[in-house]
Amino acid sequence: MRILLVEDEDRIASFVTRGLGSEGHAVERAATGRDAIGLVQYETYDLVLLDLLLPDSNGRQVLRALRAHDQSTPVLVLSALGEVEDKVELLDSGANDYLTKPFALAELSARIRALTRQDQERSDTIKVGTLTLDTRARTVVRSDLKVRLTTREFTLLEYLMRHPGQVLSREQLLQAVWGATYHTSSNVVDVYVRYLRKKLDIPGVDSPIETVRGAGYRVRSD
C-alpha cells in the first residue's frame, strides 16, 4: 500500500517509515504542509497519515486541501492534541480516524488495517470499462470471458483499476505493487503490463491498459 506520511519530526518519521516498511507498505514523507499539499494534488495514495503541528502550516489546511481534491482517500490524523473537541472537529472536516501521540506501531498498524478494510468492504467488485475484478473471489472478467492471473498480475491490475482513467507512473506502480523490493530503474512494471495485455487483450479491440508516452499507464475508463 502506498502511504503519504506528513510529519516534520525526523525521529517519528523514521519510526513510522521503518515500521510500516517492514509490513510491506511504501511510505513517502512530506515534512511540511506545503510539500504535502503539492503531493496530494498530483500523486495518488492509498492512505494519508497526517500530523497536525507542522512547521509552516496547520495540518487542518492540508486536510482541507486533500478533501477539496479527493474525497475518498482515508486520512488518519496523528497528533499530540487529544481533546475531544479537536477530534470531533477533525472528523467533521473529513478525517477518517485520529490517533494521539505517543502511539505504538501495533496500534497504528491496527488502525490502518481497519481503515483499509472498510474501504475494501465497500468495493469488493471493481468495474472499469469491459473489466470486472472481484477482490474477494480473486477473479477477473473481460467481456464475459474469465481471465486467469498470477498474484502479482492481479495486484497490479487491481491498483490500476482503483484509479480509472488516471495516469500512474512506473515509480508509483513499482512502490504500490512491489514496495522497496525493486530499484526504480527496474523494467518489471513494463514486463508485467505486457503479461496483463497478453491475457486481457482481444484482437481488433483497444487494450484496456493504455500507455501514456513518457508518463506511465492507465486503465481506460470508457
Image: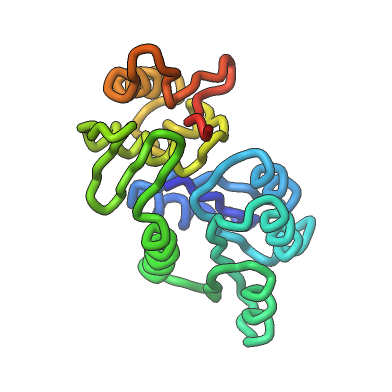
Is residue 36 placed above or below 49 in the rendered structure? above
Query: Residue 68 vs residue 104: left or right?
Result: right
Vertical order, 185 against 171 (above or below): above
Q: Hey, which residue is sitting farthest top in the picture?
A: 204
Residue closest to the far right = 56
Question: Is residue 104 placed above or below 175 in the rendered structure?
Answer: below
* Residue 105 visible, this angle: no
Residue 162 x, y percent position in the rendering = 46, 44
Q: Number of marks in the image?
A: 0
Residue 116 at x, y percent in the picture: 42, 60
Task: Classify residue 155 as left or right of residue 103.
Answer: left
Name the residue located 73 percent from the left edge and 61 percent from the top edge.
64
Residue at image position (56%, 30%) is 167
Residue 150, picture quadrant: top left
- Residue 19 drawn at (x, y percent): 39, 55
* Residue found 41% across the figure and 65% down from its top: 118
Task: Report whether 98 appears left or right of 15.
Answer: right
Front residue (pair 131, 16): 131
Indicate how the structure is coloured in the image: rainbow
Say if 195 sits above or below 82 in the image.
above
- Is residue 190 among what the camera can see? yes
Residue at x 28% of width, y 38% of height: 140
Instruction: Looking at the picture, tell me which residue is in the foreground, 53 or 66.
Output: 66
Looking at this rendering, what residue extends furthest in the bottom direction?
84
Quarter holding residue 44? top right
Give the image location of residue 143, x and y in percent.
33, 32
